[in-house]
């Protein structure tokens, strides 16, 4: 009897299929590593390689006798073999791969620096600065190393900077003393020998120092002072992109101590300019044109090189350029954009409204896809290449199929289709950002673009008044001093404007106002660049200037706000206080991370944000998107938000503060209280506090002084608001801030020091603007306000209600208010042949005094008059309550609304608000009827 087959084994005669090799087995590089380092591969613990595991392997290699350079090279090979497995066999996230490569570079550089310093200290002593402190060398990682995005066969772009000049201490007897510059130059050579020189074990990283000041002709290491001088005198636009991703990556001790942060003080002002910086568009075009020309030359006769996933059209570089361009243009004003990794920057760019969210997500997906393809190309042979193997050779076809399958595709066709989809999207977005595809000399036969005509040649093409205005520029020193490229921009801008005027697209008056606006800004060439780069912004600007005169004045005072015209959401949104405050807090946090959040920076941050928001409202206003009431609502909500943020920041920076949140309140009067603010309105404010701490009076007085200074100080960015505190108890002779109890007693006429009737008139428009509950950051977890804070708002409302509902002698009140009206009228005389929409009989002030009388005399019996809902609504309520004859209240409300509109439009056009005597007759008659009904 023959023995049967073992249970579970295949039937006799059946051939077993050979096991399917892992995808990583196709990598010729991985195969070589597995043969060469079979004994060492188990040294690397399982999982994604991180710095602690790398240190463990390095120590083991050193313990068995390998020198530092050899140990680092073997470590590199073990890490690379592991990454091929994780990426291709286990579909590891892209971040795991780039993080591991970055950790490897940082560990290797830190190890090499420590080795170099040890050797040099032994020969020359420690390098010292002027005050006897050891000088430090900072290894600055640029590009993908700085952004922690290294690919698997990347070189590392480095710049070596030392913090201070001086000389070394020398050895015993003072021998071997050298300058710090010589010391660090030798250190750079030693580091390169340890990581960059090829040996039998290869290299750790290829090292490129071409991004240092003066490139390959510059010294290997530069002092911090020399670097700052270089940035100010010789730094070129393209270098700003390179330095944007810079980061001190070694030695680790300098990073841990914080001393390396000093480099940021030199780099940030160079990379991120104070104003919106559209000059970089042309610089980036030039840089990209050079790259495409280089790629075209390399692919001449080599069509496969057109499939470079990094440098070809729609490649990785174009995604990086797209993101970096928006960061450099806006990062000076929006610090939240200052992040190095591309995948972190894309959502921030979208959140700032610089790119649709869907586009940012699509670019992020394309970036990740292209980076994963790049890694697979490099896994094949550990070559620093980005070109897909597509020649048609058998081995190349096999390599392409392997790349497709390791990316999760069945074969080449669907993979190439997806690759083309991503690249086309990237190319379209890049070309859209730079204003269309920019052809290079190598791509169009070397044809040169047509020469831009100069201003004199343009004159005959311009309409008469614009021609005369532009002709004046010919003799202006400012124009004559412009660089050739700036003069060319100006000419092209004038030509486009003249063409639009000729076509009836914009008015000649708008073109003249634009010329007046741009005249004093000619030396700020970035504004010329902005208008030229963004035709939509140029057209919107002309429409805005053509609609009214005041926008041109506002733009002259705050030219940086012009970029708001580029927003696609400009006319579809209204002011949102929560978003405004949240964005300000995020920007402050960004400044804090880089140590830039001093008082001046925060003052400017507040002013830029406020001016931009005012300009958005102004643009919507002149385009007819908002009514006068909506403009006032938005400007009032903006003022409230600015007060909340400024109060929070002032308190947090107050040295003598005695509690986490101040028990303080701001009460708004006048236009702020009535939510009727206009452009440029000042703020009528009263400050009160409720705090039994003995330090409170002094602390809150200091807080209010600081707050008023922060709101009113003029900086390079302008100011925020003029603050008027004259309505506080006892006016200008009273305390700047008082206890709430004293305020309540004053208003309710308790004691000998009490409010006048005109102050009670003002109380009808008073409003609680902010209290302790408003002092927490919107980014912080909401804390339930204390009972005292909740009651302060309620107690103010109770005091206001008690004041305006108090029993009064109606005849005496009428006489006092009429006397005050005559006093105001006498202070604003109007000629007999003119009608002032505000101060003349039948004007807005008459309506306001009538409303105040109705509220103070009737609110006790008619509680619907208590809420501070504005004059128009109160007039309607008074008629509904039977306090006015039928139709009088509504007619007066409509008249008041129309006079506000006339006043508003006159101010926008910088015209007088005094009209011909026979103007606005229906409105005047309606308000006179109101006055007669109330005061007759």
Image: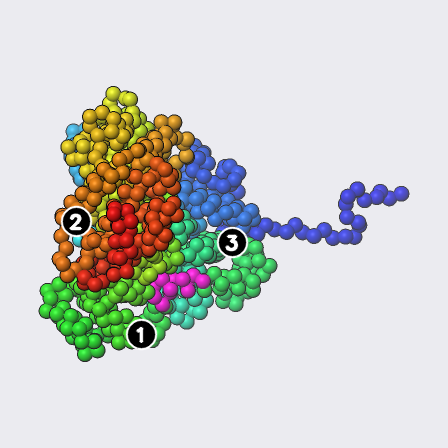
**Mark 1 / mark 2, whichever is N-terminal:** 1
Mark 1 vs mark 2, CA separation in Å: 75 Å
**At numbered mark 1, what does the secondary structure look like: helix, strand or loop?**
loop
Secondary structure predominantly adopted by residues drawn in magenta: helix
- Residue depicted at x 28% and y 70%: 506
Residue situated furthest top in the rendering = 694
> Which residue is under mark 1?
446
**Closer to the N terminus: mark 3 or mark 2?**
3
**Magenta residues (range):** 425-436
Mark 3–mark 1 CB contact (< 8 Å): no
Local crowd size for mark 3, using a 10 Å CA cut-off: few (<14), some (14–19), many (≥20): some
Q: Residues within 10 Å of mark 2 (few under 14, many from 20)?
A: some
Q: Position of residue 3 (x, y in %)?
A: 84, 42
Q: Earlier in the sequence, mark 3 or mark 1?
A: 3
How far is mark 3 from mark 1, CA to CA? 41 Å
In the picture, measured across the screen, residue 909 lies left or right of residue 154, that is left
Residue 36, given in percent of the width and then of the height, sits at 50, 46
Q: Position of residue 328 (x, y in %)?
A: 30, 53
Q: Secondary structure at mark 2?
A: helix
Kindly state the secondary structure of the residue where label 3 is placed: helix
Label 2: which residue?
Answer: 825
Q: Can residue 256 be spotted in the picture? A: no
Residue 498 inside the magenta-drawn segment: no
Q: From the viewer's perspective, is the residue at label 1 or at label 2 nearer? A: 2
Which residue position is annotated with label 3? 28
- Would you say residue 479 is visible in this rendering? yes
> 872 left or right of 234?
right
Name the mark nearer the viewer: 3 or 1: 1
């Amino acid at each position: 009897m023959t023995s049967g087959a073992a249970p579970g084994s295949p039937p006799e005669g059946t051939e077993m299929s050979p096991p399917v090799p892992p995808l990583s087995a196709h990598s010729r590089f991985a195969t070589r590593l597995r043969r060469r380092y079979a004994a060492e591969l188990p040294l690397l613990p399982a999982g994604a390689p991180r710095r602690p595991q790398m240190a463990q392997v390095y120590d083991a290699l050193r313990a068995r006798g390998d020198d530092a350079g050899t140990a680092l090279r073997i470590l590199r090979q073990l890490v690379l073999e592991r990454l091929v497995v994780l990426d291709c066999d286990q579909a590891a996230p892209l971040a795991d791969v780039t993080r591991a490569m970055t950790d490897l570079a940082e560990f290797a550089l830190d190890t090499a620096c420590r080795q170099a310093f040890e050797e040099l200290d032994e020969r020359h002593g420690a390098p010292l600065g002027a005050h006897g402190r050891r000088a430090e060398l900072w290894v600055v990682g640029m590009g993908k190393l700085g952004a922690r995005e290294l690919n698997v066969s990347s070189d590392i772009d480095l710049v070596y900077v030392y913090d201070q000049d001086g000389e070394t201490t020398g050895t015993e007897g003072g021998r071997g003393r050298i300058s710090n510059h010589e010391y660090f130059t030798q250190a750079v050579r030693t580091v390169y020998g340890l990581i960059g020189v090829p040996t039998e074990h290869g290299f750790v990283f290829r090292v490129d120092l071409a991004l240092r000041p003066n490139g390959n002709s510059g010294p290997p290491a530069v002092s911090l002072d020399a670097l700052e001088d270089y940035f100010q005198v010789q730094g070129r636009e393209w270098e700003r992109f390179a330095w944007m991703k810079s980061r001190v990556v070694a030695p680790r001790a300098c990073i841990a101590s914080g001393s390396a942060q000093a480099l940021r003080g030199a780099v940030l002002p160079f990379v991120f300019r104070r104003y919106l910086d559209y000059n970089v568009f042309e610089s980036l075009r030039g840089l990209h044109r050079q790259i495409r020309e280089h790629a075209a030359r390399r692919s001449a006769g080599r069509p496969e090189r057109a499939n470079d996933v990094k440098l070809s059209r729609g490649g990785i570089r174009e995604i990086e350029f797209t993101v970096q361009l928006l960061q450099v243009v806006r990062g000076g004003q929006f610090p939240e954009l200052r992040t190095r990794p591309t995948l972190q920057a894309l959502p921030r760019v979208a959140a700032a409204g610089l790119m649709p969210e869907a586009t940012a997500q699509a670019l992020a997906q394309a970036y990740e896809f292209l980076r994963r393809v790049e890694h697979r190309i490099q896994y094949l042979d550990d070559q620093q290449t980005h070109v897909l193997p597509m020649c048609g050779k058998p081995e190349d076809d096999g390599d392409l199929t392997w790349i497709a399958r390791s990316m999760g595709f069945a074969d080449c066709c669907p993979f190439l289709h997806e690759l083309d989809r991503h690249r086309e999207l990237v190319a379209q977005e890049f070309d859209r950002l730079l204003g269309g595809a920019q052809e290079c000399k190598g791509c169009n036969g070397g044809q040169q673009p047509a020469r831009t005509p100069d201003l004199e040649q343009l004159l005959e093409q311009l309409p008469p008044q614009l021609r005369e205005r532009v002709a004046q520029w010919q003799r202006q020193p400012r124009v004559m001093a412009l660089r050739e490229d700036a003069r060319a921009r100006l000419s092209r801008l004038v030509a486009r404007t003249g063409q639009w005027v000729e076509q009836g697209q914009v008015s000649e008056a708008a073109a003249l106002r634009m010329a007046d606006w741009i005249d004093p800004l000619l030396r700020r060439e970035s504004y010329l660049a902005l208008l030229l780069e963004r035709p939509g912004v140029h057209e919107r600007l002309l429409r805005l200037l053509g609609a009214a005169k005041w926008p041109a004045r506002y733009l002259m005072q705050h030219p940086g706000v012009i970029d708001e015209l580029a927003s696609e959401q400009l006319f579809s949104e209204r002011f949102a206080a929560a978003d405004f405050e949240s964005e300000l807090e995020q920007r402050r946090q960004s400044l804090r991370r880089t140590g830039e959040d001093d008082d001046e920076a925060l003052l400017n941050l507040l002013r830029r944000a406020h001016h931009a928001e005012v300009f958005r409202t102004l643009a919507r206003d002149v385009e007819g998107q908002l009514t006068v009431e909506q403009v006032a609502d938005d400007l009032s909500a903006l003022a409230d938000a600015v007060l909340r943020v400024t109060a929070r920041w002032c308190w947090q920076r107050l040295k003598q503060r005695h509690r986490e949140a101040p028990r303080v309140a701001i009460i708004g009067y006048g236009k702020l209280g009535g939510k009727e603010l206009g452009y440029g309105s000042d703020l009528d404010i009263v400050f009160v506090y409720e705090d039994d701490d003995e330090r409170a009076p002094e602390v809150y007085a200091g807080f209010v002084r600081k707050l008023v200074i922060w709101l009113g100080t003029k900086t390079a960015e302008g100011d925020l608001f003029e603050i008027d505190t004259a309505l506080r108890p006892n006016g200008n002779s009273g305390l700047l801030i008082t206890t709430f109890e004293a305020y309540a007693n004053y208003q309710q006429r308790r004691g000998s020091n009490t409010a006048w009737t005109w102050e009670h008139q003002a109380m009808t428009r008073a409003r609680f603007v902010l209290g302790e509950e408003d002092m927490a950051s919107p980014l912080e977890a909401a804390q339930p306000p204390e009972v005292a804070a909740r009651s302060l708002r309620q107690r103010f409302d109770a005091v206001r209600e008690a004041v305006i509902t108090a029993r009064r002698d109606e005849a005496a009140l009428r006489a006092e208010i009429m006397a005050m009206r005559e006093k105001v009228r006498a202070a604003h005389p109007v000629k007999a042949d003119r009608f002032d929409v505000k101060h003349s009989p039948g004007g807005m002030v008459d309506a306001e005094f009538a409303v105040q009388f109705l509220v103070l005399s009737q609110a006790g019996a008619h509680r619907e008059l208590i809420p501070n809902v504005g004059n128009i609504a109160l007039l309607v309520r008074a008629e509904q309550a039977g306090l006015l004859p039928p139709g009088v209240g509504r007619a007066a409300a409509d008249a008041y609304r129309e006079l506000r509109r006339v006043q508003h439009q006159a101010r926008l056009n910088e015209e007088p608000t005094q009209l011909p005597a026979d103007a606005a007759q229906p409105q005047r008659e309606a308000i006179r009827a109101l006055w007669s009904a109330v005061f007759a």
